[in-house]
Image (cartoon, helix red, strand yellow):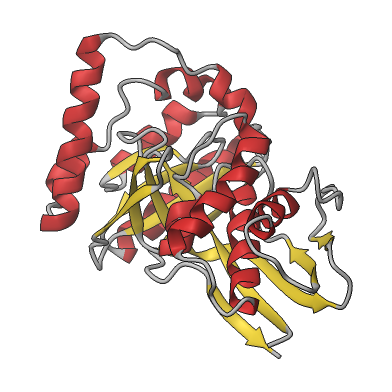
Amino acid sequence: MDSIKVFSPGSITNLSCGYDILGLCLENRGDEIKVSKTSSKGIIISTNGGYNLTNNINENVAGIAAQAMLKEIDVNNGFRIEINKGIKPGSGIGSSAASSAGTVFAINQLLDSHFGQLDLIKFSMEGEKYVSGSYHADNVAPIILGGISLVRSTDKIDVVKLPSPKDLEVIIVRPNIEIKTSDSRKVVKKKVKIEKMVKQSANLGSFISSLYTGDFNLMSRSVIDEVVEPDRALLIPEFDKVKEISKKNGCIAVGISGSGPSIFSLSNNRISSTKILDSISNHYEKLGISYDGFISKINSQGIKILDTK
């Protein structure tokens, strides 16, 4: 195999009760990435998709992740990475993670799957560190593993793939503003009162239980953010109103996707999902707020191979 093309999907993280811990893989938003072997060693990157992204391998997350990977294996060729961005940077649905994870996955295929999934998560995290200032795997883990994942540790990579109830789907609405992950992380308080930690821990545990049992009522009571949402919500246009609209139209839960500005709602039927998306869309349109919205099932596979040569 000399070249490969993959679809690397978006993701939502935190799911309100699992800051930097929980992640969910989306189905119908993502980057298309083609990686080809070159005769000369080294990495070449080109990007398109209408976003102003650098092709400098030391400043592009795909290049950073790829270099981390190639430091651990001796190869006699190089790689050309072509990224067609389908996720707007700073949207809160894992734009940088899609590029990082998709690139190392594709290169690994050209290396006859030399590295395991946890290795790919580790390499992808180098790109995340570059854009956010800290190591976190809540975006890259579900992209690589598929479905919903729990990151137990990033020191020695330890990730648990959780069940994905078959009826569960996600409504994403993104106001067309950019919030950099590094900036959004700055508003997160460094100290949390023990009372809030207890509530958040209880919510996280019961949410995981709801995934195993398919108890959507329990899920609704669990997807609550006691720690981060109150501060980050101030950065997102009409967040409280969108939350109110989602609940009025039958969502299971609603919260901030990753670092924002995207807002996610959970639903277990397409009729409710459509009502939620239409109602939020109508609200934003009345106010003249530019946005993008879509509905996605949970992608249990993760990165998909589109073509090989």
Q: Is residue 120 above or below residue 33?
A: above
Residue sitting at x 41%, y 63%: 145
Residue 291 at what x, y percent from top left? 62, 45
In the figure, is residue 180 to the left or right of 45? left
Q: In the figure, residue 183 lies in which quadrant?
A: top right
Residue sitting at x 30%, y 22%: 226
* Viewer-proximal residue among 187 and 248: 187
- Tally of numbered tags: 0
Q: In the figure, residue 235 lies in which quadrant?
A: top right
Residue 137 at what x, y percent from top left? 47, 45
Q: For the N terminus, which image quadrant?
A: bottom right
What residue occupies the far bottom of the structure in this picture? 309
Q: Is residue 49 above or below residue 16?
A: below
Residue 118 at what x, y percent from top left? 44, 57
Residue 174 at what x, y percent from top left? 57, 44
Q: For the C terminus, which image quadrant?
A: bottom right
In the figure, is residue 73 to the left or right of 151? right
Residue sitting at x 49%, y 57%: 119
* Viewer-proximal residue among 95 and 256: 95
Is residue 122 at all visible to an observer of this figure?
yes
What residue occupies the far front of the structure in this picture? 74
In the figure, is residue 216 to the left or right of 297? left
Residue sitting at x 29%, y 42%: 253
Q: Is residue 254 above or below residue 268?
A: above
Is residue 292 at all visible to an observer of this figure?
no
